[in-house]
Amino acid sequence: MPAFRSLNISTKLLLSALAFVLPVAMLSVFMDLSFRYDIRIAETELAGITHLRSSAPLMRLSAEHQYMRTVADHGSLDAQARLSAIEADIDTLLDAIDARHIEFVKAIDNAPEGVASVFQDKLTPADLRRSWAKAKDGDAGASERFQNTIRQFFRGVADCSQLAVDPALDSAYLVDAIVFAVPESLAHQHETKQTVFKHLMGEKTMDSSLQATIDTHIVRHENDMQFILGGGQSALMMDDYFYGRSPGLQTRFKAILDQYHGNTTELIRLLRDFHSNGSMSPGFDAVCDAALSDLDELFTIGLDELQALIEKRLTSYRTWRAMGYGFSALALLLAAILLLRTYLSVTGSINKVRRYSADVRAGDYNAEVEGYLGGEMQELADGISQMVNELKHKLGYLDGILNGLTVPCLVVDTEERLTFINQHYLDLYEREGTPDDYLGLTVGEFYYGDSERNTLTGRALRENRTFRIDEVEGETNKGNPLFVRYDVAPIHDLDGNLTGAFSVITDLTRLKQQQSQILFDATHDKLTGLPNRVLFADRIRRTATHAAKTEDHGYAVLLLDVDNFKHVNDSLGHGFGDLLITNIAGRLNTLIRSCDVLARLGGDEFALLLDPVSGPDEALELAGRVHSKFAAPFIINGHEIFATTGIGIVVDTDDTRSPDDILRDADTAMYRAKDKGTGRSQLFDQSMHDAAREHLELETDMKRGVERDEFVPYYQPIIDLKSGQISGFEALVRWNHPTKGLVPPGRFIPLAEQNGQVVPMGKRMLEQALTQATVWQREIPGYEKLTMSVNLAVPQLMRPDMPQVVAKILADTGMSPAQVKLEITESGLMGNAQQALEAQRKLKALGVSLSIDDFGTGYSSLSYLSRFPFDFLKVDQSFVFVMQDNEENMEIVRSIVSLAHSLGKKIIAEGVETPEQLALLRNLGCEYGQGYLFAKPLPTEKARSLLEKNPTW
């Protein structure tokens, strides 16, 4: 600006002084106006508190008046006397409120314009008197309206005194809790007391109407307590953030708040008991009076602490106002001194050099000194220019290094202000703008918006040493979670002087997310998101530990298994089965409490942990609700799926049992329930455990028994009914247990079929039986064509290598296939008819005979019977036993024989025990018979002796 350059230094300094003084003066004026406004608001609030404190007894007296009127109406003379005293107190108090109200209106005249008139329009003490006159006449509804008028009066005082819009959160929360919530709660407490009194006096009986009223009281008290506690605790929490910590608020107020919480919680519990059993605890009046007393104290102490907070804020306003004036005056004085010294020392040449230096300092390293200075000043200017050029090259080198870094980093000066920050840093914290937008901010301002906040960078500067925090949890500017490792180190110049600090951040967020996901996946089911077996076992362990420390604390474990789930997978696909599982999980989730645990253990197994439970009935009741929930079909992709479940239940209070033990017992009970049918529940008892243990022992012994050849064949003769002589034997497996003796087949054969031991056991029986048959054929005259029948279990039949196994045994023993009969149960054939048909054809190709065992007990279709390549049909002994009872039973046997003969098959009748049965079977045309009439199953030596006798029947 040429005009400015033409001015002398005095004029320039004068203009500079004016440019500085005017903004400072304007800021001072605006600061004063702001503080004056805040002070007026605080003084108005204090006037409102004074008015509320003097009016506070009115809310208690009005509620007590309504209650005493109810008591007096039931003939209590003491209540009548107390009622008169209360009415006198209210009249006196209303007079005092009239006087106080005049002072209050004067006080709020200093408040923002229009507040007083708003209050006049909103509510006046005259409204209180009119409402009191109606309530005093005995109208119950008028009493409630009088109390409502009081609360409106309190709200009007709070609104007009600015308490309702208090600028500080601690006092604002306190106003919400005390001024607005306590009067409401006090009225509700008296209403509850009045309702209980009427019930006790016989005016109200415990019916659905009274129960609904009690429910309403409970909900009101819970809501009141939640609002009061929420406001009070928020005020306590915010206390540190506004004008320093308030000892009274943290001690007196917190103590009465906790006391109120305890007494009101107990009052709600008594009301719940009253609602449940219809009788009120004798301690109700004491608890109710204690809660009422707490509310009175809460209101009084709350107003005291509210006044203390506002007075502290008022003091702060006045202090800062005075400090503002002082600092402004000091700033003006310092400016005047600085300008004077500048005027005395500055010359034109130095001004040029200073401007040049300022340009360089601002980052303009291409700047030059204006004009020629001459003499030493020119040498000085040239030297400075040379240093600037060297510095420019070095800074360019460093800038290239910093900008080339791919990790988030920043550099600060000794005042912790940003001198460098790269784009990676801003991207990590999701900040808008460019790095230049943030230069000059302190680290505290960058992170928290507060330059006074302590930071690790500031600590590194203060302590002049390197720091690292391996993991810091925070969030980005957009609220996304962030985990980082923070490294910061001080920076020194060549002389070792501290010049700033350098910080590097490593982003750990993805690593933490992966770790969290790994932990979640390890403890939760991927399909449903429910806890898995690992987490469920941990919850059982914790529950058992807690139960051991708590008297009469029980818990229950329910194990659920979906019936016929495999059929859904096989028929509709595994994807459909997964959808069914997620739907089941959703239904089960609707049945449990927040304190319970639902888990998926795998497959179609779910488990429930109920904690706590009162006993078995509660667990059984939940099981019943589960069955009811399963009654409705599951709609999946347009399909209706009906599912049922078996439920095993363990109710336990013993902490000595492991989760595996408990789940094992629940599994035992569940399978016992499934044995009863679909959709059943079973409570575990010790007998099940004993049976399961015996089952396990038997299974373990069986595996050893197969290895030790403890399973031996017993032989029962098969008689040719035409000749009456032995035509062959059926080899029946028996278990010669080393300690239990001979174990009946019914105890171990089903178990062997379950655990797969029937396959090696059956193979061994076939080897022994055919080996023995060849010995008898060779050594006993007349039995060269003795046949041997051996049972094939379904798992054996369905094995792909079974034909090869049979062929090898035939080759090893030398037994003719024509003398070998392989017996297969009817039900086993129909389990998978097509696969069974293929297996029979392959066995038949070896030359052996096939026999259908236990015919009549299954569900064979004639189409399959005609296709199966069997040679013999064995009539089940159950039909033989009863065929003499009536003609209908005889016809059943006759039909079976006719069916077999029509298909070209021969008949073997089982269970022949009497000569009469033998005669009937011969008359029916049965070819062979087998039963106790001829002989029981015999060990090898006795069977040989029978053959050597060559008996005839």
Image: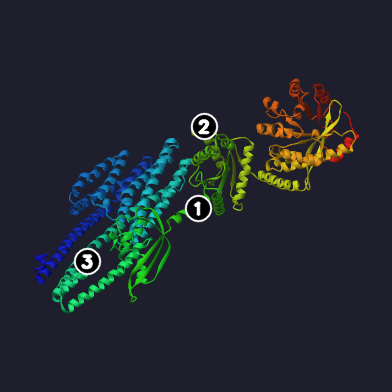
**Kind of residue sitting beneath label 3:** Met
**Quadrant location of residue 837?**
top right
Quadrant of the image containing the C terminus: top right
The front one of 87 and 61 is 61
**Kind of residue sitting beneath label 2:** Glu
Q: In this view, does 195 lie to the left or right of 907?
A: left
User: What secondary structure is marked by label 3?
Assistant: helix
Mark 2 vs mark 3: in front? 2
The front one of 207 and 560 is 560
Q: Are marks 1 and 2 in contact (CB under 8 Å)?
A: no
Dot 2 alpha-carbon crowd within 10 angstroms: few under 14, some 14 to 19, many 20 or more: few
Query: Mark on residue 640?
Result: 2
Query: Mark on residue 164?
Result: none
Q: Are marks 2 and 3 in contact (CB under 8 Å)?
A: no
Query: Could you tell me residue 506's position as x and y percent?
Result: 41, 61
Which residue position holds label 3? 323
Distance of label 2 from label 3 (alpha carbons): 79 Å
Query: Mark on residue 518?
Result: 1
